[in-house]
Image (cartoon, rainbow, N blue to C red):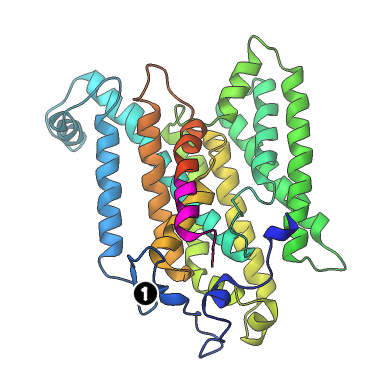
């Protein structure tokens, strides 16, 4: 694990070790030019067509997700259902229930969770200068899972399970930070190692809780929850976690320029006038809130925070001002597509994490083959 963590910047490495022209400006990695030849960046900024095209793809995937399912809908059914909510002719109760009671809440949740996990993963990979960093690096996923399992064992309502999971996830990261602090300071290496320790402890507690669960009732419920699903999506649930995800994502997107400066190294960042401690804390807190809220709402969802930022870097280079927003939209597109497949491929719904692993692992292998394992 120690070998995976580097104190040098992926941006600095990609620029041949040369210092940026001005101390406060974002470093310009090898193009912002993507390794695969296609570049979405020009002169350090996203090309004008990139965001509209990505949003159009997201809208198309969302519309397709509403139409597909065990009860298929036609585009006319969808337009009629939308018109009925805006004063048009009423539609059948079944169509209204399928569109507004089942599919739109799931798609909204998938957009929020997918984008949130992707932007948190992009922030952690850059902050820790570690290509293997994910949103659960600091133990938030394991902690949130323990909280959710406790809630399920106590048979509290779903909203209570989510609240307990959220609290335990945030508490796990708080424990990680407290372990990592030494003489009033905490280094990146200490944070990562402390996260490994806290995750191991939380996973051991999780195993003990599963061991005590009723094998006929609670254990299947716990197992299915831990594999991740959007089946329980409803607007009240979304309103609980969405503000934390939106807030955390907004902070990371606003600080994406500072990620480039932090990637140069702590000494260089301080020399440029950057408040390293405050910005690092803001990024960690934001990513923690995002991840804890996502896990609380839909269980464990793997691979998005690891895979999507790498795809964004292949398209944009290492400039975080482009990688972060592109990762956000790509994460939303990916999870909406995965959820649509999860509920349409088989008669019974496939857990989200199963599909993300089946699809994500081969894609990651392709990325490794194309890049030769070079992250920077």
At 15% from the left and 26% from the top, the residue drawn is: 90
Q: Residues within 10 Å of mark 1 (few under 14, many from 20)?
A: few
Nearest the viewer among 366 and 142 is 366
Nearest the viewer among 368 and 263 is 368
Start and end of the magenta stretch? 363-375
Q: Position of residue 169 (x, y in %)?
A: 67, 43
Q: Main secondary structure of the magenta part?
A: helix
At 26% from the left and 20% from the top, the residue drawn is: 71
Q: Position of residue 241 (x, y in %)?
A: 52, 43
Above or below, 52 against 155 in this view is below
Q: Which residue is mark 1?
A: 45
Nearest the viewer among 328 and 373 is 373
Q: Position of residue 106 (x, y in %)?
A: 39, 34
Question: Per the image, is 367 magenta?
Answer: yes
At 77% from the left and 54% from the top, the residue drawn is: 193
Is residue 179 left or right of 58 when viewed as pictured? right
């Amino acid at each position: 694990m120690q070998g995976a963590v580097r104190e040098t910047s992926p941006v600095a490495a990609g620029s041949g070790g040369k210092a940026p022209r001005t101390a406060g400006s974002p470093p310009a990695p090898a193009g912002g030019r993507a390794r695969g030849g296609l570049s979405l960046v020009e002169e350090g900024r996203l090309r004008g067509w990139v965001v509209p095209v990505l949003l159009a793809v997201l809208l198309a995937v969302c519309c397709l997700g509403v139409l597909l399912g065990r009860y298929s809908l036609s585009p006319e059914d969808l337009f009629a259902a939308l018109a009925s909510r805006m004063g048009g002719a009423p539609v059948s109760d079944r169509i209204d229930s399928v569109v507004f009671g089942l599919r739109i809440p799931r798609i909204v949740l998938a957009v929020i969770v997918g984008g949130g996990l992707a932007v948190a993963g992009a922030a952690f990979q850059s902050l820790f200068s570690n290509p293997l960093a994910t949103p659960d690096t600091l133990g938030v996923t394991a902690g949130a899972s323990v909280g959710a399992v406790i809630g399920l064992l106590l048979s509290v309502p779903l909203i209570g399970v989510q609240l307990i999971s959220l609290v335990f996830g945030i508490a796990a990261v708080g424990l990680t930070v407290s372990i990592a602090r030494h003489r009033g300071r905490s280094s990146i290496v200490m944070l990562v190692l402390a996260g490994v320790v806290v995750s191991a402890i939380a996973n051991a507690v999780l195993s003990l809780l599963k061991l005590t669960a009723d094998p006929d009732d609670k254990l299947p419920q716990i197992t299915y929850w831990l594999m991740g699903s959007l089946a329980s999506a409803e607007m009240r649930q979304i309103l609980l976690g969405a503000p934390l995800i939106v807030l955390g994502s907004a902070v990371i997107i606003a600080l994406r320029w500072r990620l480039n400066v932090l990637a140069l190294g702590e000494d260089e960042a301080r020399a440029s006038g950057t408040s390293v401690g405050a910005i690092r804390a803001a990024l960690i807190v934001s990513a923690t809130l995002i991840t804890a809220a996502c896990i609380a709402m839909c269980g464990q969802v793997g691979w998005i925070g690891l895979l999507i930022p790498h795809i964004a870097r292949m398209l944009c280079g290492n400039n975080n001002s482009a990688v972060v927003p592109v990762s956000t939209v790509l994460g939303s597109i990916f999870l909406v597509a995965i959820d649509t497949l999860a509920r349409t491929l088989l008669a019974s719904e496939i857990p989200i994490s199963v599909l993300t692993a089946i699809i994500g692992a081969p894609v990651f292998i392709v990325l490794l083959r194309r890049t030769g394992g070079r992250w920077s």
